[in-house]
Each structure stands twice: as C-alpha cells, then as structure tokens.
Image (cartoon, grey):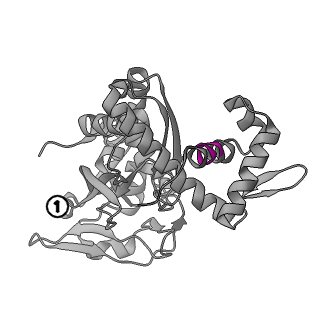
Amino acid sequence: MPVFDATQISTIALFCKAAELRSFSAAAEALGLTPASVSRAIKRLEERLGVRLFARTTRTMRLTHEGELYWQECRQALEQIAAAERAITGQQKVPSGLLRISVGTLYANYRLLPVLEAFTSAYPQIELELSLSNRVADIVEEGYDLAIRIGTPQDSRLVVQKLEDATLGIFATPGYLARRGVPQQMDELAGHDCLQFILPSTGRAMPWLLTLPDGQPLDYQFHSRLRLLDDAQGCISWGMAGGGLFQTYHFIAAPALARGELVEVMPDHAGRARQFSVTYPQNRHLSARVRAFVDFLLARLRQPA
C-alpha cells in the first residue's frame, strides 16, 4: 500500500483547492496562505509527478489534461477521507457541500426541477450544480456526484437504482387532427407528419416504442421530413404548436391532455415505457449529501413496486 506523509496529503488538498478556484491567489486566501507558498507547493508537486498540472499565462490559468484527471481522482479521494471521518465522528448527520448532478433536459424540466424546492428547503447547507444536457457524461471522469439516466448503465464503477418506468404515448393537437385525420393503425402513420428526434449520442433517429395488437413490442423505425436534433423538447414544442404527431412520456403530456390541448392517438398501441435510473460512483463511504439526494429522489419519484 502506498504511504503518503502529511506534507504530501496537504499539498494534494492545496492543489484541489487551486484547481477548484482556478487561482493560486484565491486558493491561498481560502486556506490562509500566501500565493507564493501555494505556487511553490504546486511546483514541487509537479516535479514529483513529472507532469505539468496547470497551464499558466500572465492573465489566465487552466488545468492541463493531466491536471484535470489528477484533480478528479484526488477530489474523490479527499471526499472519501472526509466522509469516513464524518461517519465515525457523527458529523454526517448534517449533509452539506457541493452536489454536482448530470441529467437529461426532459427529465430535468418535467420531473426533477419541479420537486427540487422541497430538497433545497430541507437541506439548506447543500449547494446544487445541475448540468442539463442530453450528452451522456462520464460521471466518474468528469467529477459528477450522480446522474439520472435512461435505462440501466452497464458500468461496474457505478451504483444504479431504478426511479421509474415512464410510459409513452403518441400525441397531437386537436387542430392538427382536424386537418389531417386521426390515425388508428400503424400503417396510417406514413401519411402523417411525425416529428422525429435524432439522438445526439449516435446520430440515429430514436424509434417510437409501440405495442402490436398481439401484445408484442415494436421499435417503430421511420423516416420523417421533420427532424429535430440535440434536444427532444423541440418535438414537444413543435407538436404542441400543431406541427404533427409526436411521442413523449405521459408525465409530460398529462397537463395538456387534461386541458384539452392534446389528444392521445392510437392508445391501443401504447403501453411501452423507458426506465429512468439514478446512478452514482461506487464509493465505499457514500457522502451524506449524495445519500440525502438519492433518498429524496427515491421517495419523490420512485414508482411503487
């Protein structure tokens, strides 16, 4: 097992603070040191590792690629040490600190953000930083504390807990259906404007998840003249404006259905769902803030078994 002396541990902590603040001066002020002492410590650390951790000019300072990797690993290691100390001293009863979360745009806007006020009120000492993106981030490499994802990620570094199976339907506005007719069967979809979402991760069209009359599932692949890239919210907004048929989750469409602004078509072909899961790095000592947030999500969003 590697042995680190107290000076090395403190230098790593100092490096993490400088990496977080992107400034030697700010790190020095936060830690009660002089900028010169911080600069010397970082230089010794770079010499020991044999790599440059920071790229510095007279006006800017940024982490190098090696520095970014080293920061993410050291940050997690220091957090595990802090979590272990809190666990044995009883200080873990009050969750606090920064919580970085990666979540897709649709789930964020329609499921997560509407319930977050309850979490922030219950845990005022936790800072939240949310990345709303349909890009699938590597939460371990990029330093996220947790993520909400479609499906069950196959990654041995992660713990995965199911939140819900979100059912899907096909919807359109009453105005569109009055103009174009109401489709009853799948072969009628070819005569309609079907709004198609192109997955940013693969560049391929996302299939519509349908059910055949005999109950068998079908991933319906089609080509449409109306395609949207990067953000599936575009399909919903376009469809709500009368632009065509679109498939989305019932939890998104439900309010508009209740107001009569949308109609579900071909309900006999519905019933399919996509699973949403919360994932987080498989740390031996889970931080109190991550545990608090995961428990909150499971209580608020998890469907009964």
Q: Nearer the viewer, residue 22 or 48?
A: 48
User: Which residue occupies the foreground of this view, 64 or 2?
Assistant: 2
Amino acid type of disc 1? Asp
Q: Residue sitting at 56 percent across and 46 percent down?
A: 9
Q: Is residue 276 left or right of residue 67?
A: left
* Residue where numbered disc 1 is placed: 268
Instruction: Please tell me whether residue 57 is drawn above or below residue 256 in the rendered image.
Output: below
Magenta extent? 10-14
Whether residue 13 is situated above or below residue 47 in the rendered picture: above
Q: Residue at x 65, y 47 (%)?
A: 15
Q: Position of residue 85 (x, y in %)?
A: 39, 34
- Residue at 29%, 48% in the rendered image: 250
Answer with left or right where residue 215 lies relative to residue 130: left
Residue 202 is left or right of residue 68, and the answer is left
Q: Quadrant of residue 265?
A: bottom left
12 falls in the magenta region: yes
Q: Is 49 located above or below residue 203 in the figure?
A: above
